[in-house]
Image (tube, rainbow, N blue to C red):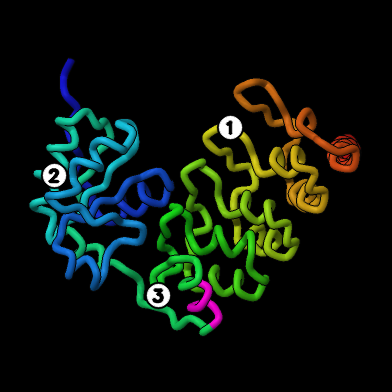
Amino acid sequence: MQQASFRRIDVTAARAIIGGGRALVIDVRDPESFSRGHIGGAELATRENISSFVTLTPKDRPVVICCYHGNSSQAYAKYFTEQGFSDVYSLDGGYEAWARAAPAPVALSPALEAFLAEHGFAAGDVNGRNKDNVTPLMVAARLAPPALVAEVIAAGADIHATNGDGNQALWLACVGEIEENIALLIRAGIDIRHVNVNSATPLMFAASSGRARAVAQLMAAGADPAFETDLGLTALDMASTKECLDLMRAEVKRRKAAATAS
């Protein structure tokens, strides 16, 4: 069998891969350079710990490797492919290219900076990831007051980023069931029909967990209760309360009536 080879990618492609939420980002620069600045969620690799990344990381997990200028990262990327990893990338231009391509920083409020620090994010980075591989928007959507969520979105947060389970911020907003946070994400254009790694939608989660207010908002925004998982289950099948089931049935009936009238 032919051994897979790593791919060289630019910053735009790297952002897309990292934004998917599953990638392991490895920085192979020296500790001092890493401390001055690094890609959000990146792990510092050294000669002493590099083997632990190979041993502990699933071989099908995407691996993005970053160095100073994109040279030594290629040697590390080759090493990972030799160890059986199937989805390995070397960042062309290294961290310098990443830093140059970063948008101009937006001044954040003290409240948002405090929120970032409290939840393990780098100062001023609304698109970084913490040790739990989630973004500030995901955490804020679940926990924070709407004014702070609105500020995170306005500061340029990627509303389409996903966590390790393939869930966008809307899923986390449904967990917290803060109605205005759900509304803010919907108005910002988040995909209400997005499916996670289990082929489940935010509506399925809301219905299965009895979060009727979230169900009502998602249905009003056009969520599809008839969408099926790989097992053939729908949000209607998953409804854990009569209130959630009745909300979806009523909206389906209204949509049918509207379609017939037109």
- Residue 69 lies in quadrant: bottom left
Residue depicted at 35% across the width and 76% down the height:
104
**Residue 108 at x, y percent in the picture:** 48, 81
Label 3, secondary structure: give it.
loop
The residue to which callout 1 is attached is 199
Which amino acid, mark 3?
Ala
Q: Name the quadrant of the N terminus.
A: top left
Question: Tags 2 and 3 in contact by the CB under 8 Å rule?
Answer: no
Look at the magenta stretch and give its main secondary structure: helix
Disc 1 crowd, CA 10 A, few/some/many (<14, 14-19, 20+): some
Residue depicted at 48% across the width and 71% down the height:
116
**Residue 241 at x, y percent in the picture:** 86, 38
Which amino acid, mark 1?
Ser
Dot 1 or dot 2: first in sequence order is 2
The residue to which callout 3 is attached is 123
- Residue 105 lies in quadrant: bottom left
Label 2, secondary structure: give it.
helix
The span picked out in magenta is: 111-115
Question: Tags 1 and 3 in contact by the CB under 8 Å rule?
Answer: no
Is 68 contained in the magenta span?
A: no
Residue depicted at 81% across the width and 36% down the height:
240
